[in-house]
Amino acid sequence: MQSKLLRLGAAGVMSLSLGAFGVVGATSGTIDTTGPGSTNEVIVENDVTSDVDNDTDIEATNRNPQRARSGRAVVRHNTTGGDATSGAAANDSLLRATVDVDNGDCGCDEVDLGGGDFSGDISNTGPDSDNLAQYTNTVDWSVDNDTDITINNHNSQSANSGYAAVTGNTTGGDATSGDASNIGTVELEISVSN
């Protein structure tokens, strides 16, 4: 009994902008004249499985309660009142965060996926021949990127200038409170490339 089997197949490829990620062609199968009772097979199988999982969580929290209060200036109960001046109170806070996450390059273009340049040729075979030309290529490529970036800035500032008072004097003098100031600066630059 004479039978011929020619099966050529290639599985699909999942590509997520990963560069040159594919199956190279140029597969062929040829069965020519065979003798009686021959079993001739040309089987080409290419199976490519790609699993890319990018899980990126970025959380930025900025709580910045600020309180600036100038001092109290009082001129009271004087025959001739003098000057009382409270100082300035100021708060200054800066948070600058630059986060750059790039998961576009998994290195899949550097993997040899095979599946190219295979030629199965079964020609004139004699009686009772059993001929098999088989090519199997299986590639399993998995990339898992899990990036968690958390930025928390809690900046509680309080500025109070001093208390200035001229009181209870026949001739008032001068009283001046000083300046009170707070400055908080946080600059973050985070770059993650997978």
Image (tube, helix red, strand yellow):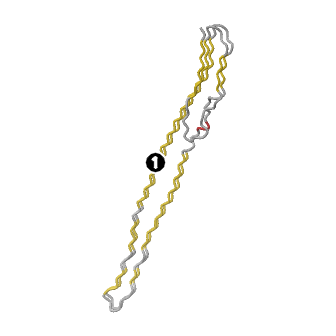
Could you tell me the amino acid type at mark 1?
A: Asp
Residue 28, picture quadrant: top right
Compared to residue 15, the image places residue 137 above or below, namely above
Query: How many numbered marks are there?
Result: 1
- The quadrant of the rendering that contains the C terminus is top right
Compared to residue 65, the image places residue 98 above or below, namely above
Classed neighbour count for the residue bearing mark 1: other residues with Cα under 10 Å, few (<14), some (14–19), many (≥20): few
Which residue does the numbered mark 1 point to in the structure image?
Answer: 57
- The quadrant of the rendering that contains the N terminus is top right
Q: Nearer the viewer, residue 23 or 191?
A: 23
Find the residue positioned furthest to the right: 124
Compared to residue 83, the image places residue 183 above or below, namely above
Q: Nearer the viewer, residue 102 or 33?
A: 33
Q: Position of residue 160 (x, y in %)?
A: 39, 72
Q: Position of residue 123 (x, y in %)?
A: 68, 15
> In the image, 62: left or right of 113?
left
Residue 178, picture quadrant: bottom left
Q: Position of residue 156 (x, y in %)?
A: 40, 63
The residue under the point 53% across, 32% down is 49
Q: Position of residue 92 (x, y in %)?
A: 46, 67
In terms of secondary structure, where does tag 1 sit?
strand
Q: Nearer the viewer, residue 125 or 84?
A: 125
